[in-house]
Every structure is written in C-alpha cells, then in structure tokens.
Image (cartoon, rainbow, N blue to C red):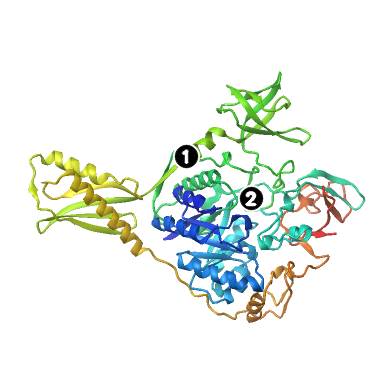
C-alpha cells in the first residue's frame, strides 16, 4: 500500500508545528544556514522542537540545505548536517552535489528542484546516485510525470500549490546578473515580479509596463488523484516565506482534499492522526495571484498575471461607486478592515481597504472610484484571519481500549490506528461493586477522556466483572495507559538511515557549462567521478557574458498571440524581441520552438 505524503512549508518552528497540527504528513524548514530562502533559516534548537512534535504523529521533518556552497562553506555545512542528524531530522533537501562527498551521517538526501529535475534520464541518475526522493520540476505535464515514475523507483515529490518560478529552477541567473543576489545562493531579488515593456526589432511596442514574467500561482487541488495515480508520493505546498495563517489554511484545505481520496487500501496517509478545524479551509482566502494548473495538461496562454504581482484573493461579486462609497452585490459577509482589489478595463490594478462596512456598503479608507459592473475581489478577509489567529485545529490519533480480567487482576490495553498497543494492569485489590451499571458507565466515561494528549479514545470495551475502583484511581490508570502508549510509539517509530553510496555511473552529459552550478571542488569531484569530461564554474563564481540568464517554459510570443506555430494570422513582428524593465535594464529574447522554450539574455 502506497503512503501519500502532504508536505507543508515552515518559515520557523512555530509555523511548522501548526502545519503538523493542521494535517501535514511532513514539513520542510530551512537549515540555520545555506537554504534557498536565506530569510527563512531556523536554529538547531527550533528544528529539534519541531522534530519532537512531528514525530509524535510519525510525521517527518525535512531540512532544506539547498544552496550551492563555496569550498570554505562545506565544512560549516558538514557540521550543521551532523547536528541535524543528532536531533532526529528525517532528510536533507540539497542542491550542491559537493555535500555527497562529505563525511556525513546516514541521513537520507532529497534532490532539490534546484537540481533541475525534468527528464527521465536526470531522475534515474539521481536514483542510482543514492537520493531517496526527487523533487520534480514544476513545468512537467502529467504524462511526463507518469513516464518518470514508470521508468524509476525513487520516491517522487511534486509541487501542488503556491508561487511559481518562471524559469526552470536552478538555472535562473537574472538576479545574480542584475544585482549580484544569487537565487542558487538563497538570495533571489525576484526580478520576475517587476514590470517590463516588450518591443520588437523595429521598436514596435507589444506590451507596456506589464508584469510579463510574473506567473499566476499553482493550484492542483483538483488534480491530486491524477498526480497520485501517475506516481507522485509527496505533494508539496510552496511557501517557506509565508505567514502562519497561510500555512494553516492551505495545509488544512489539502488535508481535507486528500482525505477524500485516500481509501486505506490502495493509498494511505503517510502519518498518524485526524484533524478537526474551527474554521472552513478555503485556499481562495489566502495569498494567491489567481490560480493555474500550469503545464499539467498542456500549454495555456493565460499563465501570467500582467496587471499585478500581488494577491488578488477571492471573487466576491460586482461593485460600483456612489457618493464616495462602494456598493457591492454579493452573498458574502464583509467586515471592517477587509482588503479589496479590482482591475479596470484599461488593465490598471487598484487595491483598497474598507474603513467601515454596513451590510453591502463599503466606506473605503481612501478616495477611490469603482466603475459600474466592476468585478471585485477580496484579498484580506479580517474575520477569516481572526479565526486563524487563534487555536484553529486539533490533531488526534484514534485509539481503542479493552479492559479484561486475568489472574484476578484487571488489565487495560490500548491500541492505536497504527496497530501499536500498550498494556497497564490495575494492581489494587479488587472489591465487589454495589452498583455495577453505574460503575461500568463511570469506567467508560473516564477511559474515554484523553485530555490534551495526542490521542482520541473512540471505544472502551469492558470484558470482565465490574469491581469498585475509585474515580481517582481510574483516572491515574488511564493516564498511565496513555503515557505507556506514547512511550511505545516512540520506541516503534522507524527512522530511515541511508549511507550515501559512492557511485561512478555516467552523468547525463559529458560536458557541464555554468548551468551545472559547480561552485566548489567537492562538486567538481562528484561530476568527474561520474565521467563528466569538462566542467565549467558556476555563474556565481565566474559570470559568462551573452549566455541565457533565464530559461523558461513560459513563452511571451505565445502568451501575447505571436506564436509562429499557433498564431499565423497575427500581425508579424520583427525579431529579436527586447524586454526592458522599468529601471532601464534590457534583455534579449530567443525562442526554441522545437523544445517550446524561451530564453532571456542580458544585454
């Protein structure tokens, strides 16, 4: 039976703990240093706190140490890895092959999406090299994912929700080229979220001050069955910089969607416990730039949100201005302080906050005009955020208790949903009971209580005569039983330990240019060991003029209706096309129609 993992992000231990409480089977969090989100590193002590909480539910903690490293940093990384192993970290997510050459403990390694994992050949190589799990490129179609799964045996992890990088991950150098902040070193300046103008070789303006590289956000909540059937075992939510309410809500939403799919026969949950929520999960209420399934079912035009890189939120209805107020036609409840946005017919994007709300009439906090029949979106729901700011979920492991008599002693056995059990006997002398029916009810009532433990007692069965036992003694007996089960679960939790092997099978190419991201001698040693003949330095170590700084599946010619294959009737344009940022930085575009890719070159 395949275990399916819901993998949630954590900016810090507090958010990671709430991700577990809201249904995550695993959490990924940044190492103290060297993670691809430099602003989201966590201390060893905080990660240990998260690990202890997660392991109660047999959930896992993966630590991202997924930047490329200098020779000097490798020793620091090795020390951190040993510390992470010692506190029980379940796996490391890495990009730099140099780490595999270090003296590290037997901790499983996951191949970060920063390794650019988009072909059968690459994933097969990583599997043979010793990686336990491979994070697939976001650009893959369902057919490509299925082909990879059928051609390999390694566990496959795929993104299902959140922000999208417009470039193939790991081969974007626009930020490094533009301001010296490397995406591969955890410091991306997000040049893709800037406005650009696009002109052809004659100066014809094809787009003016639009967010031409800013993709809408991923949402595959309607496609989870397809992904699982195709061979994906880990479903990943993006967002290691997201706040706690985002992680709570999105995790809970995907947990509910998964629970409707998993049947316990073909597929089962990868960890223990079921969640109950004090709110109704809804991904539309958390940060998102509209929603797309990207290339899962082929290429689509409208994958960029040209008007804004900001969150649009949920559609609530239509609106118009009247006497300085905004009248909304909606069935939804609105609150003081809610945030709203809309796009005018000319493409101009506006956002505003509600100062006060009376029914469906908004008094905005600033002067703003909303034309008639404007579609209005709410990107901040104050009532929803208030609900999430409190304790909003409870996760409990189902158990059953059986009480029976053996050799003149009452024995209580508790068994959980993982078929783990513990037994505690009641050692006091058994005394006859004057009111057996009442005593039976009292015993069942006391043993069904689980307090603030991780357990839920669903059933208490008594298979013995009824004896008098004081309520206090029953309560202590129950506490001892739950503590014994907690200890037994800890003893029986399996930890995967894998020594990364030394291999020498051939890499997928014999020559590596700057896109190999070889930033240290240990990484170079790895590739030489795998028969790569020529190995260039990383772009961060030695910038190369005139090479692509971004390679994308997204194509602006296609998005704007100028594709030579699909838009032959469209007005012709003269290449090369030039992409110019509002700061004056210019880039030249080139197109590989056979591969259906666009590359961006710095001028």
Horizontally, is 472 left or right of 217 in the view?
Answer: left
Horizontally, is 128 left or right of 363 in the view?
Answer: left
Q: Position of residue 300 (x, y in %)?
A: 69, 49
Of labels 1 and 2, the one closer to you: 1
- Counting residues from the N terminus, which is met first, the one under dot 1 or under dot 2? 2
Query: Dividing the image into 4 quarters, which one contains the N terminus?
Result: bottom left
Horizontally, is 526 left or right of 434 in the view?
Answer: right
Q: Circle 1: is it few (<14), some (14-19), or many (20+) Cα within 10 Å?
A: few
Q: Position of residue 159 (x, y in %)?
A: 58, 55
Above-or-below relation of 204 to 70 = above
Horizontally, is 500 left or right of 428 in the view?
Answer: right
Nearer the observer, 197 or 477 = 477
Above-or-below relation of 342 to 360 = below
In space, the residues marked 1 and 2 are separated at their CA atoms by 26 Å
Identify the residue shown where x is 77% and y is 51%: 556
Q: Which mark is residue 138?
A: none
Q: Which mark is residue 390?
A: 1
Identify the residue shown where x is 67% and y is 63%: 185
Secondary structure of the residue carrying numbered label 2: loop
Q: Is residue 131 visible?
A: no
Q: Position of residue 459 (x, y in %)?
A: 26, 47
Above-or-below relation of 88 to 334 = below
Nearer the observer, 83 or 320 = 83
Q: Which mark is residue 163?
A: 2
């Amino acid at each position: 039976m395949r275990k399916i993992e819901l993998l949630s992000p954590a900016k810090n231990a507090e958010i990671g703990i709430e991700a577990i409480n809201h249904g995550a089977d695993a959490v990924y969090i940044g190492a103290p240093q060297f993670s691809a989100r430099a602003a989201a590193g966590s201390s060893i002590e905080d990660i240990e706190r998260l690990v202890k909480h997660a392991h109660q539910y047999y959930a896992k903690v993966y630590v991202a140490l997924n930047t490329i490293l200098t020779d000097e940093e490798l020793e620091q990384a090795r020390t951190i890895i040993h510390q992470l192993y010692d506190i029980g970290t379940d796996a490391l997510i890495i990009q730099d092959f140099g780490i595999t050459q270090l003296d590290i403990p037997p901790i499983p390694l996951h191949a970060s999406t920063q390794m650019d994992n988009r072909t059968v050949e690459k994933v097969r190589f990583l599997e043979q090299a010793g990686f336990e799990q491979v994070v697939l490129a976001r650009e893959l179609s369902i057919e490509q994912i299925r082909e990879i799964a059928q051609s390999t045996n390694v566990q496959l992890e795929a993104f299902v929700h959140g922000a999208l990088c417009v470039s193939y991950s790991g081969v974007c150098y626009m930020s490094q080229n533009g301001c010296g902040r490397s995406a591969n070193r955890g410091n991306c300046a997000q040049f893709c979220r800037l406005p650009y103008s696009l002109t052809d070789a004659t100066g014809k303006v094809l787009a003016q001050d639009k967010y031409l590289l800013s993709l809408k956000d991923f949402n595959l909540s309607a496609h989870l069955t397809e992904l699982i059937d195709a061979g994906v075992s880990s479903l990943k939510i993006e967002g290691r910089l997201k706040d706690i309410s985002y992680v709570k809500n999105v995790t809970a939403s995907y947990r509910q969607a998964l629970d409707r799919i998993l049947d316990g026969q073909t597929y089962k949950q990868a960890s223990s416990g079921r969640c109950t929520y004090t709110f109704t999960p809804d991904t539309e209420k958390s940060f998102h730039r509209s929603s797309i399934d990207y290339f899962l079912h082929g290429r689509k035009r409208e994958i960029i949100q040209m008007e804004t890189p900001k969150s649009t939120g949920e559609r609530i209805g239509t609106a118009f201005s009247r006497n300085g107020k905004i009248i909304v036609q909606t069935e939804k409840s609105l609150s003081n302080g809610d945030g709203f946005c809309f796009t005018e017919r000319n493409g101009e994007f506006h956002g505003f906050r509600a100062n006060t709300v009376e029914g469906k009439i908004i008094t905005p906090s600033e002067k703003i005009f909303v034309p008639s029949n404007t579609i209005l979106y709410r990107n901040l729901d104050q009532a929803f955020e208030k609900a999430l700011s409190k304790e909003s979920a409870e996760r409990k492991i189902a158990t059953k208790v059986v009480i029976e008599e053996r050799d003149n002693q009452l024995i209580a056995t508790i068994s959980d949903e993982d078929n783990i059990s513990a037994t505690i006997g009641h050692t006091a002398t058994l005394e006859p009971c004057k009111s057996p029916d009442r005593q039976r009810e009292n015993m069942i009532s006391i043993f069904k209580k689980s307090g603030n433990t991780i357990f839920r007692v669903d059933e208490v069965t008594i298979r013995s005569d009824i004896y008098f036992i004081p309520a206090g003694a029953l309560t202590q007996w129950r506490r001892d039983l739950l503590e014994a089960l907690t200890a037994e679960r800890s003893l029986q939790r399996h930890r995967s330990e894998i020594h990364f092997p030394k291999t020498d099978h051939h890499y997928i190419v014999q020559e590596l240019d700057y896109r190999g991201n070889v930033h240290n001698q240990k990484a170079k040693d790895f590739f030489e060991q795998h028969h790569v003949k020529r190995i260039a330095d990383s772009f961060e170590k030695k910038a190369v003029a005139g090479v692509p700084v971004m390679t994308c599946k997204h194509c602006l010619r296609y998005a704007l209706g100028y594709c030579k294959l699909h838009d032959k009737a469209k007005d012709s344009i003269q290449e090369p096309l030039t992409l110019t940022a509002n700061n004056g930085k210019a880039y030249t575009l080139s197109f590989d129609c056979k591969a259906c890719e666009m590359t961006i070159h710095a001028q």
